[in-house]
Image: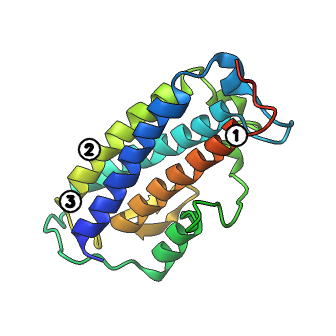
Amino acid sequence: MTTLELVDELKRITQANIDLIKRKFSHLNAQQKSWRKDNESWSINDVFAHLNEYAKYYHPTFLSKIERTRFNEPKEIFISSPLGRSAWKSMKLGNARNIKRKFNSPRSYNPIINPDLLNGNEINEFEQGQNQLLTIIDAAQTVNMRKVKIPISISKIVRLKLGDALLYVVYHNERHLQQCLSILSHSKFPTT
């Protein structure tokens, strides 16, 4: 794909996430945001806390790598690495906007195991993070997204190309917003 197509995809999904938050989640009350269908399931707050924790790692890492790189000549074409393609494809929603594969969240990113991730401001924090991500995507266009490498959150040894890492994060966000929509549509979700 071209770098322009990559950037358009990243921005389109991130802007759709912001719009979805405003339409579906920003008006929810505390009971609705913390409702779980059972003890093992995540609430809407849990999902956003999980995403915010990832943003706390990835957003500063993206900015730091973009600012400090010597590869500041953007390339017209972006080519994913096999590892990068595998990573973001595992997060990407299916054609029917469905979650194809489920994954267990690392303990440090799981709000049921690690309730300290919850701060009571999860949805607003996520929306602010999505706006920051749009700025990061703009900055990423000014560098070679094939050469800048991003260490992944669970292993600093494994590195993805900047373009692959951005796709991974954006698809991960989109995937979890689908999870939130699923929570909203549950038959026992509190209506008030």
Q: Would you place residue 49 above or below residue 159 in this image?
A: above
Residue position for label 1: 185
Toward which corner of the image does residue 72 lie, by quadrant? Answer: bottom left
Q: Position of residue 100 (x, y in %)?
A: 66, 66
Determine if residue 148 is in view. no
Q: Position of residue 160 (x, y in %)?
A: 43, 68
Q: Secondary structure at mark 3?
A: loop
10 Å neighbourhood of mark 2: few (<14), some, or many (≥20)? few
Q: Nearer the viewer, residue 1 or 155?
A: 1
Side of 57 where 8 appears, left or right: left
Q: Nearer the viewer, residue 164 or 131?
A: 131
- The amino acid at mark 3 is Gln
Residue position for label 2: 135
10 Å neighbourhood of mark 1: few (<14), some, or many (≥20)? few
Q: Residue at x 40, y 53 (%)?
A: 13
Q: Would you place residue 167 above or below residue 89 in this image?
A: above
Q: Residue at x 47, y 39 (%)?
A: 20
Determine if residue 180 is in view. yes
Toward which corner of the image does residue 113 lie, by quadrant? Answer: top right
